[in-house]
């Protein structure tokens, strides 16, 4: 693994781009500052693909990415062998460039979750590589286009700058002099180049020139037309400077664009249900896992990328990305040859794996929803979850307490409970076993009756009731699942 | 200064409470994760007291406090001498106790601002002292009241817990046995006490007992009534445990309540306009400052609290609180004796200072607003800002560009520009000098005409226009002021 931070990014950039261009596939993993921005955005077993996608999208636009791992896999010349180049990026949103100043939500428990895996928040905030989205990029370009290069540089002393500007403003209004010199000692330690830009931006009716020998700035009162003529010759320099500024702001977004262009991305998403990525990796990497189907692909860390050699660093984005890529290769191998007699299995090229994975392209695994995955390239699969359960109070006086129901049912597995009226509720179960156990266990319950839900029997206005209203999620399980969802 | 973090809080708590009870006054300073959650919440020179209060309130409810300084001042037996006990708290919102899981907004530039002063974000997130507001406290109490102590402890392995619960659920439904023993090796490293609580909470029809000798948990199938009888004797233990849990969650809120009770708080708010707290402190602490009025109060750091001795650590909440208290004493002294001949000035008690500060009680200094302070104990003062300026395009074709206007005007001081129509705009100036300079400088401008704004002349529907609509803030000044507002 190679760590990428703000101070090393420019130097590492060509290496990263080269690796992306040359590779067979890229596994990607991210760490975020939250999982759900409020209770309505929590995953629920009632969610269909479209609703879950909407929840994820809205959440992702409000939280921020603090770490991103790219594990870049290339086939070596040896049979079945791949080489992995893994980069672990700390990311921090671009701020202070013109109007761009991102606000992001942190979920207290999500940051605490990262603490368990020794996440370094100082590296995230002090040393995170910048990035912008397309809206922000446009804002920065617009800001630069108003011919103001200053305001882009946030590291100058604003009080000192204001002091100088007041002096100049005063001089313009009150002095009869045509020319004024700002000497080194007048400049309050602000770099000459930046001060020069700032003065030009703020005052339309002056012409400034940096006198490099005397190290002073000469200010001359001019008309706007005169100034325009004088500045035309400087346009080319300006453009170069602007390009550099924009590249600095774009930061990681530049890499992401290259990845899109080469279409080699593979998102980290657990391929086996109810099983954590770490566990699947350990299983497939073991001797038993290796021999499930003969001639499995093997992976070596590329030279200079061996910080993950013989070491599990789960929940560091780089390592999770690496595990994801490794698991992807092994499962692809198993799927490719699952119906082939052992004797016919042969070492194969990467593209053969891709052919056997056609059914899985663009399908994003989701947990705790009515579907197992979201298909971002077409229609979602039909739900394979058990039917909903219908709960009603069996005593006139007894009103259903949703938290209480969630506590009663949660020992049997993942459940979400949604109130219909004070005496009726729906329950979504994660699997058939759970549904069956609940029906069985509460057969002769003192306060409630449970049956399988029938849309004809139990609701004349099915859709309206089913997909609206507040969903109250299982008290115990939801809280435990959320901070750990990757492990669920 | 004494630093207070999660792991030291319980031990330091009595010391802090004692200091609060015994003191003359407390200075308080806070560091937050943001200053404005979106552009509508930005401070503007158009804000009156009520609007600014509303903005601050909404912002404060969305961002979070990451550091809090308490500087606790007590008069010593020596004339004019005070002793300061300064505590610097790292705070982090309570999370993972029942349903409580705070979401807070971070502003990218605000965290970068804290970086400039070496803020330790790892200490904030890993080691911040817990706190809750009253709503959250109620949620925790309600959660505990459902007799579920578990779900409060987030540090257990949820996967392991789920595994055990499934075994028990299975046993309840399918086994004929009346009693089951969970041995040490069945417990998956979950502490016996916690597992016992969890089982009781999840399964209403069992009775669990911890066998301390065999270190196992005995589970017996019982009816709900039988269980109730058996548990009555344990109620007292339970209550004690609940009390401890709540105190742990409350954390810093316990200290805040003591402060409210003793009413000795003094919020950090710069007392002199346009001057940073650090500068005022340095000035008043200098030889010249000391001799402004004779017999000034002096301050020593209490024994064991001397980490700030001869050291400026600006923007650490503890040090800012200490400076605030120091400046408060010195200014109180100056105000108390400003009309007294030097020969009549005598060392005085603290309460005499309080009497002379009556006019300032409950007034919160605000920057960049139409008023200088918000009075949280009565009516706001009348604005002392200059009249608004009225800008109109002087050429039919020329449409006003708000960013351009802001750039033209900002060299003359703090300004905010608000569009009325495509050819008219209002400008609020921070002071009379700025307003006068702008009127003068743009007298014969090519594109725009500026006059003082007259509500009769320029607007038939004054209020509607004035206090609604989007406020676009000066491009240059706003961005530089915001991240540094404490210094402005």
Image (tube, coloured by chain):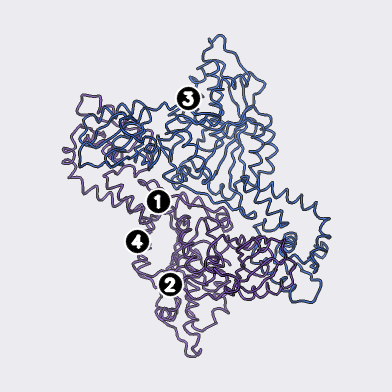
Chain colours: A purple, B blue
Chain letter of the residue carrying label 3: B
Asked if both marks, 3 and 4, belong to the same chain, the answer given is no
SS for tag 1? loop
When the figure is inspected, residue A181 is found, relative to residue B334, above or below; the finding is below
SS for tag 3? helix
Image point (47%, 87%), residue name = A345
Residue on which the image places disc 4: A14
Image marks 3 and 4: residues in contact by CB distance under 8 Å: no
Marks 3 and 2, how far apart at CA: 65 Å
Which disc number belongs to residue B75? none
Dot placed on the residue nearer the N-terminal end, 4 or 1: 4
Q: Quadrant of residue A437?
A: bottom right
Residue on which the image places disc 3: B283
Estimate the x, y position of residue A322 in percent, counting from the top left.
Answer: 48, 68
Marks 3 and 1, how far apart at CA: 37 Å
When the figure is inspected, residue A15 is found, relative to residue B275, above or below; the finding is below
Dot placed on the residue nearer the N-terminal end, 2 or 4: 4
């Amino acid at each position: 693994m190679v760590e990428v931070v703000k101070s090393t990014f420019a130097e590492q950039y060509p290496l990263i781009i080269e690796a992306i261009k040359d590779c067979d596939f890229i596994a990607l993993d991210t760490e975020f500052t939250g999982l759900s921005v409020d209770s309505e955005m929590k995953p629920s077993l009632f969610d269909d693909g479209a609703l879950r996608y909407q929840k994820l999208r809205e959440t992702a636009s409000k939280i921020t990415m603090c770490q991103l791992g790219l594990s870049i896999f290339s086939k070596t010349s040896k049979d079945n062998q791949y080489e992995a180049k893994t980069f672990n990026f700390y990311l921090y949103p671009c701020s202070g460039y013109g109007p761009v100043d991102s606000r992001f939500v942190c979920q207290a428990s999500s940051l605490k979750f990262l603490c368990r895996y020794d996440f370094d928040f100082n590296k995230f905030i002090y040393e995170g590589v910048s990035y912008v989205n397309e809206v922000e990029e446009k804002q920065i370009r617009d800001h630069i286009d108003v011919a103001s290069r200053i305001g882009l540089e946030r590291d100058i002393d604003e009080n000192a700058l204001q002091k100088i500007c007041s002096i100049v403003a005063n001089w313009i209004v009150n002095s009869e002099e045509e020319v004024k010199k700002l000497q080194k000692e007048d400049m309050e330690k602000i770099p000459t180049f930046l001060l020069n830009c700032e003065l030009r931006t703020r005052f339309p009716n002056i012409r400034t020139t940096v006198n490099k020998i005397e190290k002073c700035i000469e200010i001359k009162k001019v008309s706007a037309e005169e100034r325009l003529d004088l500045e035309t010759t400087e346009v080319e320099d300006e453009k170069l400077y602007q390009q550099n500024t924009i590249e600095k702001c774009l930061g990681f977004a530049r890499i992401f664009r290259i990845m899109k262009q080469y279409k080699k991305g593979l998102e980290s998403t657990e391929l086996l249900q109810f099983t954590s990525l770490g566990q699947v990796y350990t299983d497939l990497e073991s001797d038993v896992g290796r021999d499930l189907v003969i001639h499995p692909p093997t992976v070596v860390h590329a030279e200079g990328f061996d910080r993950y050699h013989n070491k599990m660093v789960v929940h560091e984005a780089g390592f999770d990305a690496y595990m994801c890529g490794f698991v992807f290769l092994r499962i692809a191998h198993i799927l490719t040859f699952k119906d082939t007699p052992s004797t016919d299995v042969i070492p194969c090229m990467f593209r053969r794996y891709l052919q056997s994975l056609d059914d899985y392209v663009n399908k994003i695994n989701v947990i705790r929803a009515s579907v197992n995955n979201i298909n971002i390239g077409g229609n979602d699969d039909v739900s394979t979850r058990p039917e909903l359960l219908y709960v009603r109070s069996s005593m006139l006086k007894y009103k259903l307490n949703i938290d209480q129901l969630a506590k009663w049912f949660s020992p049997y597995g993942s459940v979400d409970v949604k109130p219909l009226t004070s005496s009726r509720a729906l329950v979504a179960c994660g699997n058939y076993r759970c549904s069956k156990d609940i029906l069985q266990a509460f057969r002769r319950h003192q306060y409630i009756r449970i049956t399988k839900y029938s849309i004809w029997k139990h609701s004349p206005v099915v859709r309206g009731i089913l997909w609206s209203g507040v969903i109250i999620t299982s008290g115990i399980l939801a809280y435990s699942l959320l901070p750990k969802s990757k492990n669920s």
